[in-house]
Image (cartoon, coloured by chain):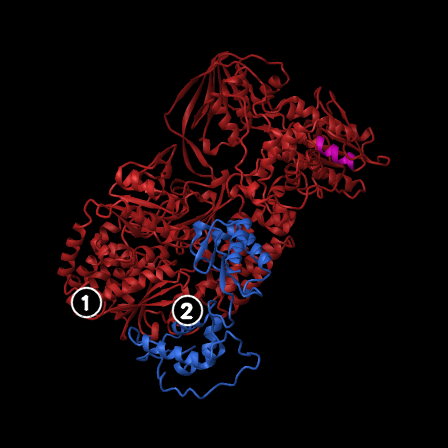
Amino acid sequence: MKQPVESDTICPDMSKTPAAKTLPADPAQEPSAQEPSGQDIARFLSELEQQQLKPSRYADLIGILQQVQQQFGYLPAEAIRQVSRRTKVPLSRVYGVVSFYAQFYTEPRGRHTIRCCRGTACHVKGADRIVDTIRQLLGIDEGQTTPDKLFYLEAVACLGTCFLAPVMMIDNQYFGNLTPQRVQSVLDSYRTTES
Amino acid sequence: MKPLKSANELQALHKNLSRQPGQKVAIRVCSTGCRALGALDVCDALEAEISRRGLSDSAAVIRAGCHGLCAGAVAVVIDPKDIFYQNVTPDDAPEIVETTVVGGKVVQRLCCSAGRRKTSLRRDVPFYKHQRRLLLRNCGVLDPRSLEDAIAYGAYLTAAAAISNKSPEDVIAEITASGLRGRGGAGFPTGRKWQFARASAGEPKYIICNADEGDPGAFMDRALLEGDPHLIVEGMLIGAYAIGAARGFIYVRAEYPIAIEHTTLALDEVRRAGLLGRDILGTGFDFDIEIRKGAGAFVCGEETALIASIEGARGMPRPRPPFPAVRGLFSKPTNINNVETWANVPRIIEMGSAEYAKIGTDGSKGTKIFALAGKVNNTGLVEVPMGATLRQIIFDIGGGIPGGRKFKAAQIGGPSGGCVPAQYLDRPIDYDSVQEIGAIMGSGGLIVMDEATCMVDIARFFTDFVQKESCGKCVPCRIGTKRMLEILTRITNGQGEAADIDRLIRLGEMIKQTSLCGLGQTAPNPVLSTIRYFRDEYEAHIVEKRCPANVCEGLITTTCSSACPAHVNVPEYVGCIAEGRYADALKVIHRRNPLASVCGRACHHPCELFCRRGDLDLPVAIRHLKRFVTDRVKDVGTPLQWPGRREGRVAVIGSGPAGLTAGYFLALMGREVTVFEALDAPGGMLLVGIPKYRLPPEAIRRDIEYIRQAGVEIVTGRRIESIQELRDEGFDAIFIAAGAHGSGRLGIPGEEMAGVRDALGFLREVCLGRLDKLTGRVVVIGGGNAAMDSARAALRLGADSVTVLYRRTAEEMPALREEIDQAVLEGVDMRFLVAPVAVEGDRRVRAVRCVEMALGEADESGRRRPIPKPDSEVVIDADHVIVAIGQYPELEFTASDARVAVANGRISVDPVTLRSSGDVFAGGDAVTGPATIVEAIAAGQRAAMAIDEFLGGSGELPPDAGFASRSKPDEEAAAAPRQPIRSLSPAGRKGSFGEVLKGYSAKAARTEARRCLRCDLE
């Protein structure tokens, strides 16, 4: 297990880390048009460091990763490498954290994230049929993005809105008391607005 | 706000602020939970309307937290009058402002019902009336985004007083004396936990608020943080002072954006006000709190995993000891409590431990918040004293189960908890009692499950959840839950093996004993508790390959067809009706059920109970549609004809629904069938047990004609005296479907008097037209369908009054709801909670002497037991008494036969083949005791298949699909409401046995048929 280190800054020695020392690039990871550049990431991490110094005196690796992901939509390999360098947490350990938590993504995702609730109340009220319908309509499985990059589908444990069961969220909008028919009309409405 | 320098300054500020609200009308809109249904739009619309009408000085919209009654979202409370509105939309804003704010009157249509009436007052709504809202007191009242509002309602006064006037030891002593136990699940005494952390060596110390509310189905922590964040912060402030902590963390799920937003805001404001930070209120006490967002790992609810997560590592638990109180966050002494536990702290200090300890049970003090969800009418947040019963929570507060279904179980405690069956509905719920019945209190998620919930599927669901959320550190949890999931999956797919139940128990016990942390140690609970209470459901899946709740996809087609004991292809024939192809619809029905006209009128239609349309508004009126086609299609049509020579002779004893159906299918399969009927006309109980106003003889005749055309010979007026007699006549197989025509007796003095008769005898006389007049006062004893039929028939015969005596209440009556309602509508007087002890009179009955009953605790079925009240006596005058308390088969003719097994007065058979032994098969009421028509039809169908196989055939039923088109009706047509059915006016029913229900018109039938969701096409 990791031995926690209490330190005075959120990202110890961030500024002093030499940016030149790079890890071997993964050849499978061809930079796509969406992928942020190393400089973008470095700039963002520096900004983060400035802001975060105030309230917290503790290493907050998860918090940093969350903010990076919020900025870039996912955690590019390069960002994970830079976070590791700046926080001096070994890359293997940072990656261990990234892969452990369900809400970290190492791949870019569709423009809209559909979170389909699979909580108990939703399950009891037929969530399976809702997920099946979404899967059929979009032609993707949980954890996948549609070819047109419009939707990303994920199943989540519980959205805590059991009174709306069965429920899904598209980005920050809830859709409750769903039926397969209603799912279709909701997805259609997103399609229409986007095209 | 300026930083507050002392407790006195805070006090002064509170006084100042709490004076201000004055008589301004406050419109409190739930803007947290209800946001999902457009609460913010409602706020905007109300605000716009108020400012448009220039009312800003006299009314204000408050974007408050959760009101609790989430089923009524968007929920609005209007103070000072305490008016509660539900299902508010932005369109309602002008009317609310006009009628309530300006006019001081109530908008009736937005009010809740209380019993039969509507009520405008929040405190009179049944949902609130039975609660004790101690922690949720200000949730939904104050504006969670405003510190001033919180202080106006007294926030931080308790903390300030404690920090200024009490020693840390005193605070801990107070918490210990209150008996508070941790609300996160395990229920460890909070005071002791604090004491450990305070006593531990090491600086600094930390406290943590666990808001990683990961249990699916729990949302009380979310509501507290969203609706009253200052309550939690105040609790932590007091706790930090008592323990000597310098820093606190609130670890909250990232899935709760509003909770994060409101808590962040609260912390910023409180810090600015000098209630957090250095030298709080000039007391020299330093303390600050920061928020950490979870990243989606259920295991982080476990305290050591949560600590690892705050430290920035993978959220994996570690062995305890050392406990966090000794070695926790950053290896320092740490105290972790759940949100709801922290919320209790200010209340305890405020009211004093002695007062607090008066709430609750001996071992569990205070209140508990439950998140009520699932198959219950009033979903939402419920706060009750510890020791409330499930019946109070689910029925009194929760408003019971929707859709007329029965309660099956309550799942308490999430994936670590268990399913509590109906028999424990009256057990007071606290930490210890819940554990005794195989669940845990957990965080307080309470999911209500009804007949349409499959317990094996639920066990599989939770196992799937914990298996995915297992962190993988220890083997039993990582691999054991995977193995359990595999077994459960194959059971739900219909591939279960006989030894699977024992395998699950063995594995479950092993995982419980050997896992590292609470997740693994409790992971098997949902499986073990469902096996404990619902083993029969597991067995149905494994042995009969049947899902009794019609849920498991591998075992059902559609819920309606699966719920129909005869498995009629409902969507197919409803689809035909929607297309106007009525003859085809009838054909589809006849492929599984030859008694279409009968079932179209008198079936208890379990298909509708499980119809998915019922989850949206009301189920498709399947029975009425069936009747429509039998009325509409004048030509009964020709059944499928067996082309070759018939082989194998089958004798059927009894021409009720079981016998007729078996005969019909055996004829279709090419057997030579003779049905023997003791009475002069065929039909069995259909003919002599159900009065004509419910089932006209023409309907029975029509169906029997169809069955005859399939090649069934029916011999009436011949009573079979022994089975051997049939063998001697050359029959190769015998199906006993003799029904249950014997009547139960009261076993009380005076039963033999003139004027006392049994319901079956009475109904037989009425149905056969031998009794056409009955005068005087009639008393019917019993609560089943025969009692309702007798009562309604007696009224039609001219009885002056008809009174039904039943020893329990309407809730527990076994008769069909619609029959009870019709009886009441026609003027039958229901006397509940009375049980007869003697029939009085002088050779002829004059009265029935009864004792009053009271309802005790739930029995096995969840119905409350009737208990006689001592020294209570009621005498009810009666000229006639009809006893309807049970029926049993008359099986004398089987007594001498070695191949008929009889147990408990019923024939016992193999549940799948209905074979008793050798050439004897049996089904219907003679096997099950009094049951329903369609269950008898199903028995006939299954017996036909088994007998055909016994005689060397394939036992296959004719195909029943391919009639309707495979396209769904369009959404607009499907949106129609359930079509009403016309019926004879209650006045017109007196003295007439004319059929009560009228059929659908073709237009109504097609509209109704288009409401079908066609689940078969999914």
Q: Is residue B662 magenta?
A: yes
Q: Position of residue A178 (x, y in %)?
A: 50, 50
Can residue B861 be seen in the rendering of this structure? no
**Chain A: drawing colour:** blue
The image quarter in which residue B280 lies: bottom left
Q: Is residue B883 magenta?
A: no
Q: Mark on residue B305? A: 2
The image quarter in which residue B116 lies: top left
Q: Amino acid at mark 1?
A: Ile
Q: Measure the alpha-carbon separation of dots 2 and 1.
A: 31 Å
What residue is pinned by disc 1?
B280
In screen coordinates, is A56 left or right of A144?
A: left
Task: Identify the element where label 1 is drawn.
Answer: helix
Give the number of marks: 2
Q: Amino acid at mark 2?
A: Ala
Q: Position of residue B366 (x, y in %)?
A: 30, 51
